[in-house]
Amino acid sequence: PNPPALLLQRRAQVLSPSLSISYAHKLKIVRGQGAYLYDHTGRAYIDGVNNICHVGHSHPHVVAALAKQAAQLNTNTRYLHETILDYTERLTRTFPEPLRVAFLVCSGSEANELALRIARTVTGRQHTITLDWAYHGNTNAAIDVSPYKFNRKGGRGKPAHVQIATLPDPYRGSFKGTSAATGVAYAQSVAEQIAVIRATTGQGPAAFIAEAISGCGGQVFFPDAYLSTSAALVRKAGGLVIVDEVQTGFGRIGEQFWAHGPQGVIPDIVTLGKPIGNGHPMAAVITTAEIARAFANGMEFFSSFGGNPVSCAVGMAVLDVIEQEGLQHHALTTGEYLKRGLLALADRHALIGDVRGQGLFVGVELVQDRETLTPATEAATRVVNHMREHGVLLSTDGPFDNVLKIKPPLAFGRLEADVMIDALDRALTAPH
Ligand code: PMP
């Protein structure tokens, strides 16, 4: 068998069949650099979808910081060391007041697990509102607020303590467009779920958890005023607002460092993950001093690996690179350039129903018919496979797996955008 097939055989022997693999790719990847991945034959691929290696694969500044700190000290947060303070002081400064307290953990799931625990402890309530098609992680509490998992194959359905609000999708949902009036209309669904929780428990929710842009829901950008209106409703009912920035944060959207900014809301709790360690397992929960105090209530919190000196050194280096290389601005301008190219393709290819994006967080929704919006799921798979053969890695997401998701490392530039657009053009033209 060829080398990727051999790896698949070995995986089947030793790894659980439930461990997912990006079958669309099926490559033996041996090296990464900047916006590129290289397979065992030395062939380069543009990595169009890896939002973990945020500042670029194997970025030399991050690698050097990791190696330097690993050679000097690594231990857990029960020992007094400076790295965790240097890092959390700098990290929390990227947030608006009063978000000034950090908990450092190791994965987005852990961050959401902790955020939910904080909200439930502080409010003394259990019920939580989540958005349809959301994914917040694969640990118990996180999966319970992830309809993307519990309503899909193998899922156990909605738990009793969770209510699902409508995904505010300006393209496919029942209210169209991105105006504030549409945002307010969608927020009614949050009001309805608060009413359901009140009817069941006699009180409001512990929390409302949402991404600022829905990733797994299909790269869906919420209409104006949606999050701020929903947040006001939840707070009025005594609940906390958790915004999951695991995918959306760290300058990717270009305009602001965090995606909740443009939505005009300051969350009570923000969860971070993927990009903050550029591939090193790091995540965080950011909240206010008041909430952190109420949560502590005498109980200790401890994570063996969260906030260790090596992770903190890596985290600092990632922030250095974003700043020194102007990556937030780069994401904004490259994203605009990419979007213009994609919109030009939409003029020529009827399969493209919608192009949406902010910075380098972009979605291209493929439809069989622009009137009925019938999802072009098979075409999306075909396009992803064709593009891989032409050196560009993408994948699909959304309820119908018909949205091409484009979330490259921020090392992705205009040259890569040109190649991606050309590959997409060919894939959409190719006979099948
Ligand atoms: N929240 C969101 C929005 C995510 O996309 C993910 C991962 N895809 C998670 C949480 C979970 O993060 P992790 O896989 O690091 O546990």
Image (spheres, helix red, strand yellow):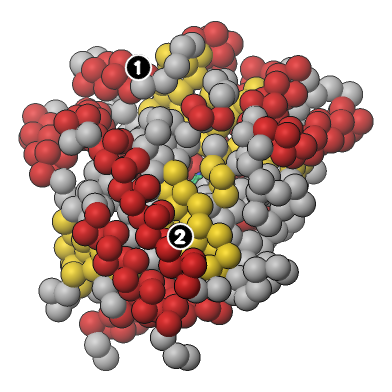
- Taking the image as shown, residue 231 lies to the left or right of residue 106, namely right
Image vertical order of residue 217 relative to residue 392, above or below = above
In this figure, what is the number of numbered marks? 2
The residue lying at 65 percent from left, 73 percent from top is 369
Query: From the viewer's perspective, is the residue at label 2 or at label 1 nearer?
Result: 2
Q: Which residue is mark 1?
A: 93
Q: Which residue is mark 2?
A: 343
Image vertical order of residue 123 relative to residue 257, above or below = above
The residue lying at 24 percent from left, 87 percent from top is 2
Q: Secondary structure at mark 2?
A: helix
The spot of residue 230 in percent (x, y) is: 70, 29
- For label 2, the crowd category at 10 Å Cα-Cα, with few meaning under 14, some 14 to 19 and many 20 or more, is some
Q: Quadrant of the N terminus?
A: bottom left
- Residue 342 appears in which quarter of the rendering? bottom left
Q: Name the one closer to the observer, 220 or 276.
A: 220
Disc nearer the start of the sequence (2/1): 1
The spot of residue 95 in percent (x, y) is: 42, 20
Q: CA distance from mark 2 to mark 1?
A: 36 Å
